């Protein structure tokens, strides 16, 4: 117990020195579960993933089709607005940037924002250019294993800090929707679930944009 407390402090000291601990955050070695509402069940036969709105061609992928999209791995520090941060988290999944580069999704020139749509109507919004950064992933795996149900199985958005990539915007972790079912490309911004509840629309962790 004492050991794990001092180990946590040491780790936190280290990431602080490395400039990786955003203001007002503290390091956790656990993986907290945080969401509103129940955990949905996954039925691969009924599941689909939709992309619509300001795209040249709307798509609907079955679980099989989605599973065959090109895969990417990324390691990130993730920062929850409730003040815990988890460092060096390893994710695997599908990069939206790759999907656009390879022509699986063709945004119209009018597309400026993307709304993530998840089970039970949960939504969260980000600018298109942030969603196309290397630190946004449609993740299916965490730490080499499929996501657990409470962390968003089978697919979730994740966004965080990639060490050494100071060029990237880093929003708080709520900007990745668990149990993600689709992406809506829009001309205008539209606040999502937590954004409507008073959280900051941009949610930059370095600027500490927690509340509106
Ligand atoms: N569908 C859905 N996704 C969600 C949320 C939610 O309420 N519903 N909460 C967000 C918040 S506030 C955080 S911090 C992360 C937490 O992910 P975790 O439970 O895997 O730690 O999920 C985000 N994604
Ligand atoms: Mo959060």
Image (cartoon, helix red, strand yellow):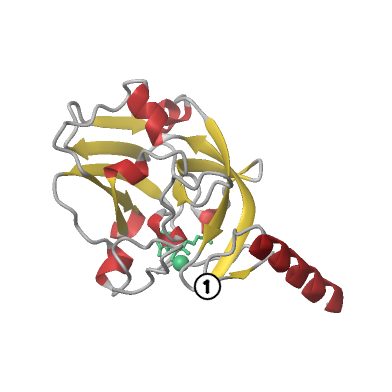
Quick check: which quadrant has ligand 1?
bottom left
Q: Quadrant of the N terminus?
A: bottom right
- Which residue occupies 65% across, 65% down? 16
Residue 209 x, y percent position in the rendering: 37, 68
Residue 10 x, y percent position in the rendering: 77, 68
Q: Is residue 30 visible?
A: no
Q: Is residue 121 visible?
A: yes
Residue bearing the label numbered 1: 83
Residue 138 x, y percent position in the rendering: 44, 41
**In the rendered image, which quarter is residue 2 located in?**
bottom right
Q: Is residue 51 above or below residue 19?
A: above
- Which residue occupies 33% across, 28% down? 100
Q: Secondary structure at mark 1?
A: loop
Q: Looking at the image, which residue sits at the far top?
A: 102
Number of marks: 1
Q: Looking at the image, which residue sits at the far right?
A: 3
**In the rendered image, which quarter is residue 102 located in?**
top left
- Which residue occupies 21% across, 31% down? 58
Badge 1 density bin: few <14, some 14–19, many ≥20, Cα 10 Å: some
- Which residue occupies 31% across, 21% down? 103
Q: Quadrant of the C terminus?
A: bottom left
Q: Is residue 81 above or below residue 67?
A: below
Q: Answer with left or right where residue 147 lies relative to residue 181.
A: right
Residue 155 x, y percent position in the rendering: 46, 44
Q: Is residue 97 above or below residue 126?
A: above
Q: Is mark 1 within 8 Å of ligand 2?
A: no
């Amino acid at each position: 117990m004492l050991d794990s407390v001092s180990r946590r402090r040491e780790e936190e000291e280290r990431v602080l020195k490395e400039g990786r601990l955003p203001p007002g955050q503290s390091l956790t070695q656990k993986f907290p579960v945080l969401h509103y509402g129940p955990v949905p069940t996954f039925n691969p036969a009924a599941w689909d993933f939709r992309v619509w709105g300001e795209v040249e061609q709307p798509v609907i992928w079955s679980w099989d089709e989605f599973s065959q999209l090109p895969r990417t791995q990324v390691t990130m520090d993730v920062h929850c607005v409730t003040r815990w941060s988890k460092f060096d988290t390893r994710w695997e999944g599908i990069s939206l940037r790759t999907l656009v580069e390879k022509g699986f999704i063709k945004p119209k020139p009018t597309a400026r924002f993307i709304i993530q749509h998840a089970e039970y109507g949960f939504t969260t919004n980000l600018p298109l250019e942030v969603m196309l950064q290397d630190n946004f992933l449609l993740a299916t795996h965490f730490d080499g294993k499929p996501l657990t149900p409470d962390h968003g199985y089978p697919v979730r958005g994740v966004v965080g800090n990639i060490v050494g990539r100071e060029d990237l915007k880093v929003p708080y972790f709520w900007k990745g929707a668990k149990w993600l079912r689709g992406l809506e490309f829009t001309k205008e911004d539209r606040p999502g679930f937590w954004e409507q509840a008073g959280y900051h629309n941009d949610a930059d962790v370095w600027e500490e944009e927690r509340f509106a």
